[in-house]
């Protein structure tokens, strides 16, 4: 099918943000305390990209979806137990760091190489999806760099919607300031789309999807390529997690306006 | 709106060979044992699937929680079964694991004077204090000179159950022979003509009452030749099977406890060796046992057990746990510590008397849902693991012989293995060991020792009553401390505020208010966020249901509110408790604490649900 897409979603694996996250300095630079024992999730930004990608593939006949993810293999395996229940996908596993403290350029080079190795990949049909930002460090540059490595010049960031047209082009909504969208029409792939939140909710866990995915997931994990990302030359001056403050008060039947006023007052006290 | 039960629904089905319910230590033991025999050395199937010819055996495990590492248990274990499965086990490979390095049994005196102690205990306490120098009573505690053999965990391990489950699960998944799907609750067993044919997954896209809503997705039917049920002490599938297929004659689950724990990062200057184990009793109430286990990295698990024979109409665990950690004997270690995690779970403590049918046509029961916990040794994880491992051996035997999973075959291959194992021998010794607690704490302690040292030949006391049967009214419980009018006034005030009554009642009985420090001593609401990170995915029905609200209105105790580990059940002016799914941690305590029955069943129904705790450090 001439107008079909090959959607490749680049998604990192991040520690479950509901866990206690504490930066520490290790022999290889900054890290999170007990990082390997923390449960992990697919980066929430990239997860939106995955769901949107799966939806697009369902709409446009002949399209395919791959998920390219770099993380320690054990972590990838853990995350896939949940992700694989969400949408049909083909995994391209890269066994490498996922700490969020790796150099974005080297990470992008590794991911681009992984994309090129996908059997049957046709860069002229490629839509490279990923998160606009990342929950690991929020640098938000890796996807852009992967696109550049692959020679893709049409790049969109903060995407909330893609609408394929009959002529093979597609319309893209990008977030801009003032809570508005910029509407662009792209003549066709290849393109990079860094997703904001899109409009799709998280798909429900589907055992049939999980079963179908599992037939290819374990082999993909077993043949995961090694992702060599060094931290040489990187220097982090300071690492910290966002400051949290908690004050709990139970109120009943309080008007929402009053709740909002109180919250604003509390936030602006800082 | 119609509920799902009232409308005809076409459900999708999947055929697998073995469907497993719940991923905990029991299922870890089963799948570890099974998975090692499913492939040949060249990777070809050693046992072919019956549902997918030419493929390896299709083994799928469904877990309610969002991750396999979100279990709760305060674990010190002799690890006999675990070590048998992993010869040469290096604890350093398991995060937060440490070999037991020292062990003490400590009697805690009441430094506050609010504890409800019997005359015998009060006399004993006075004697301990009078001879404090001779007996070396320090920090209001008496360290016993030895740990009784039945209680000790020599050569054992201190574990985090969350980390242990993650470690086991990672190895299982990397074997490629079994699938584990978290975030996928099972609602019930599929039973036809007394035979279990598989399980039904929970409906998604329904409203709080279970009626189809946006995105309605009926739970899929999973057909399996064998269903392995290891869904823990309060599992919906276990209870469904017990209700529909019955229990062995004379057996009934009557004894429970709720265990609640903190995982605490200790002050840097606290020098407790990893593997340090403290067992305590005597405080905050004499009926409560407690523990402190030290993990590597200066982290400790600290918790208490509130048993069903604690005849208190408020049976709160959280407030008592806060007093427990502030006992001078423990507080010298814990003061200045930081809360890392928190959790609670029910413990099914009926032992042999609560044992269900271990196997039937098409199914087998393992772990705590099979009454595997040993109440004398205070050990459940290793027992659970071993039940699973024994079933794994039996299933392999049947598969290799090409025998079907009938009741007779499973009884021979699994139940008989269990009867011949150390599990059964020790469970027999423990069977009546705690009957003495029906008559009081001192009698209970003597009875435990008697049962242990006579290998179960002698015991004290009488068979346990059900938790609801023992319950006394608040007026009786607080007689001499609070008047009925005072109690009623407190309850009415709490009805209006929509809170539980145990806080103000304990305040009035002399328990000092908790001075919150924002780090370790935090409010019950905050601990849900700081320690438990409780999650409730949308699109699922309420899993706590009050069957007859008139019965709730008349209920004077509202024990479901008082003992709720997450403050998910609250009082209301209407007299009917409210349930907030977003705070429920699935501890299951409401299920066994409800004293009211309707048509032979508890008025409070705990059904299958989704979500729960989100902490992997418990």
Image (tube, coloured by chain):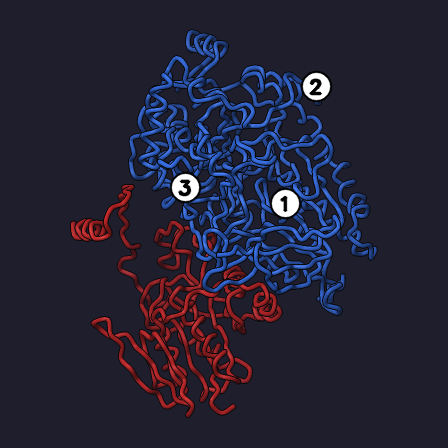
Chain colours: A red, B blue
Q: According to the image, label 2 marks what residue?
A: B454
* Discs 3/2, front: 3
- Chain letter for mark 2, please: B
**Residue B136: % across, % down:** 45, 14
State whether residue A240 appears in this view.
yes
Relative placement, left or right, of B428 versus B64 is: right
Distance between the Cα atoms at labels 1 and 3? Answer: 25 Å
Q: Residues within 10 Å of mark 2 (few under 14, many from 20)?
A: few
Q: According to the image, label 3 marks what residue?
A: B578
Q: What residue sits 50% from the left and 62% below the top?
A: B216
The quadrant where residue B77 appears: top right
Determine the secondary structure under disc 1: helix
Mark 1 and mark 2 in contact? Answer it, CB < 8 Å: no
State whether residue B268 appears in this view.
no
Q: Nearer the viewer, residue B231 or B492?
A: B492
Q: Nearer the viewer, residue A80 or B560?
A: B560
- Chain letter for mark 1, please: B
* Discs 1/3, front: 3
The mark that comes first in sequence, 1 or 2, is 1
**Residue A146: % across, % down:** 39, 78
């Amino acid at each position: 099918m001439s107008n079909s897409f090959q959607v490749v979603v680049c998604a990192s694996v991040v520690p479950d943000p509901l866990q206690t996250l504490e930066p520490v300095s290790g022999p290889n630079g900054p890290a999170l305390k007990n990082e390997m024992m923390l449960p992990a999730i697919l980066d929430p930004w990239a997860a939106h990209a995955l769901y949107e990608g799966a939806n697009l593939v369902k709409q446009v006949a002949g399209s395919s979806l791959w998920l390219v993810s770099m993380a320690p293999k054990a972590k990838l395996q853990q995350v896939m137990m949940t992700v694989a229940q969400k949408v049909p996908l083909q995994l391209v596993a890269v066994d490498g760091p996922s700490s969020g403290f790796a150099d974005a350029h080297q990470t992008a080079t590794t991911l681009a190489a992984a994309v090129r190795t996908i059997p049957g990949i046709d860069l002229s049909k490629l839509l490279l999806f990923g998160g606009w930002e990342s929950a690991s460090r929020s640098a938000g540059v890796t996807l852009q760099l992967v696109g550049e490595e692959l020679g893709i010049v049409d790049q969109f960031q903060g995407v909330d919607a893609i609408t394929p047209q009959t002529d093979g082009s597609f319309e893209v909504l990008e977030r801009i300031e003032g809570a508005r969208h910029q509407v662009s029409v792209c003549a066709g792939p290849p393109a990079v789309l860094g997703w904001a939140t899109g409009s799709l909710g998280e798909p429900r866990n589907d055992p049939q999807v999980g079963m179908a995915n599992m037939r290819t997931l374990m082999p993909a994990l077993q043949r995961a390529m090694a992702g060599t990302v060094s931290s040489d030359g990187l220097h982090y001056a300071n690492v910290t997690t966002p400051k949290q403050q908690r004050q709990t008060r139970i109120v009943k039947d309080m008007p929402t306006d009053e709740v909002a006023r109180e919250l604003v007052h509390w936030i602006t006290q800082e | 709106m119609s509920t799902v039960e009232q409308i005809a629904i076409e459900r999708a089905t999947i055929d697998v060979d073995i469907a497993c319910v719940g991923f905990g230590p029991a299922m870890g033991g089963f799948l570890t044992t099974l998975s090692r025999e499913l492939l040949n050395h060249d990777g070809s199937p050693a046992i072919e699937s019956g549902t997918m010819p030419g493929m390896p055996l299709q083994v799928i495990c469904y877990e309610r929680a969002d991750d396999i590492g979100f279990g709760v248990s305060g674990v010190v274990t002799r690890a006999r079964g675990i070590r048998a499965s992993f010869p040469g086990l290096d604890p350093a490979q398991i995060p937060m694991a440490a070999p037991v390095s020292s062990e003490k049994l400590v009697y805690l005196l009441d430094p506050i004077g609010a504890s409800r102690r019997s005359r015998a205990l009060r006399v004993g306490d006075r004697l301990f204090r009078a001879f404090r120098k001779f007996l070396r009573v320090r920090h209001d505690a008496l360290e016993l000179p030895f740990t009784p053999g039945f209680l000790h965990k020599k050569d054992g391990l201190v574990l985090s159950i969350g980390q242990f489950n993650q470690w086991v699960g990672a190895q299982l998944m990397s074997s490629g022979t079994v699938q584990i799907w978290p975030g996928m609750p099972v609602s019930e067993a599929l039973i036809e003509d007394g035979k279990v044919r598989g399980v039904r997954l929970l409906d998604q896209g329904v409203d709080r009452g279970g009626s189809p809503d946006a995105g309605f997705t009926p739970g899929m039917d999973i057909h399996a030749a064998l269903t392995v049920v290891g869904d823990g002490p309060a599992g919906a599938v276990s209870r469904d099977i017990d209700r529909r297929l019955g229990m062995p004659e004379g057996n009934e689950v009557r004894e429970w406890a709720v265990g609640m724990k903190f995982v605490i990062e200790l002050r840097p200057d606290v020098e407790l060796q990893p593997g340090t184990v403290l067992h305590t009793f005597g405080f905050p109430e004499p009926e409560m046992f407690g523990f402190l286990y030290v993990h590597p990295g200066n982290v400790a698990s600290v918790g208490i057990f509130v048993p069903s024979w604690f005849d208190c109409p408020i049976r709160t665990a959280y407030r008592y746990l806060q007093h427990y950690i502030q006992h001078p004997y423990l507080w010298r270690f814990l003061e200045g510590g930081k809360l890392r995690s928190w959790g609670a779970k029910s413990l099914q403590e009926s032992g042999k008397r609560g044992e269900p049918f271990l196997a039937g046509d098409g199914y087998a029961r393992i772990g705590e849902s099979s009454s595997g916990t040993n109440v004398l040794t205070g050990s459940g994880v290793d027992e659970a693991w071993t039940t699973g491992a024994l079933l794994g051996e039996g299933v392999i035997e049947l598969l290799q012989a090409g025998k079907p999973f009938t009741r007779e075959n499973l009884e021979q291959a699994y139940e008989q293995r269990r009867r011949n194992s150390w599990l059964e021998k020790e469970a027999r010794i423990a069977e009546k060991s705690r009957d003495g607690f029906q008559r009081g704490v001192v009698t209970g302690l003597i009875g435990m020792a008697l049962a242990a040292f006579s290998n179960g030949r002698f015991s004290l006391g009488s068979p346990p009553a059900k938790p609801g049967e023992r319950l006394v009214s608040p007026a009786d419980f607080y007689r001499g401390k609070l008047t009925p009018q005072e109690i009623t006034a407190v309850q009415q005030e709490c009805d209006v505020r929509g809170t539980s009554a145990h806080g103000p009642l304990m305040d009035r009985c002399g328990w000092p208010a908790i001075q919150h420090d924002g780090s370790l001593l935090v409010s019950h609401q905050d601990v849900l966020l700081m320690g438990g990170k409780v999650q409730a995915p949308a699109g699922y029905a309420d899993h706590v249901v009050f069957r007859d609200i008139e019965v709730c209105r008349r209920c004077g105790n509202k024990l479901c509110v008082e003992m709720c580990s997450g403050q998910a059940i609250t009082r209301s002016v209407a007299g009917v408790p409210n349930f907030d799914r977003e705070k429920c941690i699935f501890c299951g305590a409401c299920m066994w604490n409800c004293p009211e029955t309707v048509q032979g069943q508890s008025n409070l129904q705990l059904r299958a649900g989704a979500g729960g705790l989100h902490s992997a450090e418990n």
